[in-house]
């Protein structure tokens, strides 16, 4: 038997996809060269992957073109009906309160004084004849069943579009005993006055002065009707809706504020625009001297 060492070594098995290194001459062995069929199959697979990529790109372009052709806000495929819009739930609305027991009692006590009554979320609002507001308030305060003995607020609302009665006085009454609230309303024409309710609730003194100052509604038989926040010679009423919101020059500012040059005025406007401190130049610091000196711009309350 011949020695195993003398036998020639078997060639290494060929593994697909593994490149066999070349010999010392630089030429790969014949076993490393793939057959013609394998080369053709690799090219076909590569060509198929390229076609798939092209088809995907074409599909994306088609979808983008279709989406661009749809009108703004349209969703889904062309011709698909839009989903129904969910109707917003309506909140509570005011209802007629003519049958309320308190309204019925006022109608029975004061013939023609109650003009309108409504109820909203448990709160009753009654519109009263302006000429009878004092006697209605006095009755509500002294009546044993209601006893609205606390005037929690007295204010005003401006309706500039309502030319007949653009102003409306609102009285917020509260019964401490019954823990019940009632709102009275009085419509006032421009230039008309309303009877003061200080004889019923003395606390109405300051509230009516505030309405007179900021809305311009006068109150007859008020013990001390004058401005409460603004100087007595101020022009206009700031809480009206037709009053300017920004700083304005008027007769009062021209009379009481120191004169400023154009440069100083421009500097002041720039500081106000950037929210900087207003009292930062001598002319503006003179404002403190006006109020601290002998010259009274707004007399103190007695």
Image (cartoon, helix red, strand yellow):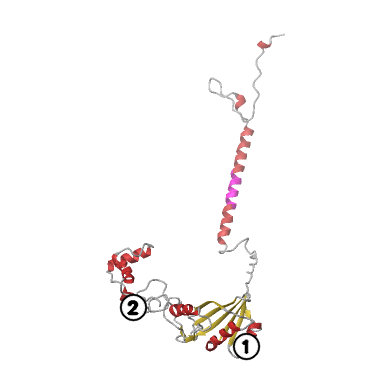
Residue drawn at 64 percent across, 22 percent down: 12
Of the pair 25 and 12, the residue shown nearer to us: 12
| Displayed quadrant of residue 150 | bottom right
Q: Is residue 63 above or below residue 48?
A: below
Question: Mark 1 touching mark 2, by CB under 8 A?
Answer: no
Dominant secondary structure (helix, strand or loop) of the stretch shown in magenta = helix
Q: Which mark is residue 271?
A: none
Give the position of the C terminus as an image quadrant: bottom left
Query: Residue at the bottom extreme?
Result: 111
Residue 228: horizontal and vertical position, in percent?
42, 76
Residue drawn at 54 percent across, 88 percent down: 132
Q: Is residue 15 left or right of residue 214?
A: right
Residue receiving disc 1: 107
| Displayed quadrant of residue 119 | bottom right
Q: Provide the residue span drawn in magenta.
A: 50-59
Give the position of the N terminus as an image quadrant: top right
Q: Is residue 244 left or right of residue 268?
A: right
Query: Residue at the left extreme?
Result: 261
Q: Secondary structure at mark 1?
A: helix
Residue receiving disc 2: 251
Query: Residue at the right extreme?
Result: 1
Residue 55: horizontal and vertical position, in percent?
60, 49
Q: Secondary structure at mark 2?
A: helix
Of the pair 235 and 206, the residue shown nearer to us: 206
Q: Is residue 66 above or below residue 206?
A: above
Residue 47: horizontal and vertical position, in percent?
60, 42
**Lower sequence index among marks 1 and 2:** 1
For the residues marked 1 and 2, what is the alpha-carbon distance in whole angstroms? 48 Å
Residue drawn at 68 percent across, 11 percent down: 4
Residue 13: horizontal and vertical position, in percent?
66, 24
């Amino acid at each position: 038997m011949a020695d195993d060492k003398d036998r020639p070594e078997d060639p290494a098995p060929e593994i697909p996809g593994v490149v066999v290194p070349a010999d010392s001459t630089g030429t790969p062995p014949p076993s490393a060269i793939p057959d013609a069929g394998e080369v053709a199959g690799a090219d076909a697979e590569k060509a198929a992957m390229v076609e798939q990529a092209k088809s995907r790109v074409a599909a994306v372009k088609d979808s983008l073109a279709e989406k661009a052709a749809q009108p703004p806000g349209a969703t889904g495929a062309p011709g698909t009906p839009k989903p129904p819009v969910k109707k917003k739930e309506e909140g509570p609305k005011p209802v007629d309160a003519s049958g309320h027991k308190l309204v019925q009692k006022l109608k029975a006590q004061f013939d023609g004084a109650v003009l309108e009554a409504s109820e909203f979320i448990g709160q009753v609002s009654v519109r009263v004849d302006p000429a009878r507001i004092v006697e209605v308030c006095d009755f509500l305060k002294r009546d044993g069943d209601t006893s609205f003995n606390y005037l929690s607020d007295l204010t005003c609302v401006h309706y500039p579009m309502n030319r007949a009665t653009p102003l409306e006085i609102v009285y917020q009454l509260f019964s401490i005993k019954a823990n019940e609230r009632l709102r009275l309303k009085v419509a006032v024409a421009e230039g008309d006055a309303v009877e003061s309710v200080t004889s019923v609730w003395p606390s109405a003194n300051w509230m009516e002065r505030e309405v007179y100052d900021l809305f311009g509604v006068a109150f007859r038989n008020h013990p001390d009707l004058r401005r409460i926040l603004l100087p007595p010679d101020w022009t206009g009423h700031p809480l009206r809706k037709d009053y300017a919101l920004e700083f304005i020059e008027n007769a009062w500012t021209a009379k009481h504020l120191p004169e400023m040059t154009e440069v100083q005025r421009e500097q002041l406007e720039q500081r106000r625009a950037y929210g900087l401190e207003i009292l930062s130049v001598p002319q503006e610091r003179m404002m403190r001297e006006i109020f601290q000196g002998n010259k009274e711009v707004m007399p103190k309350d007695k």
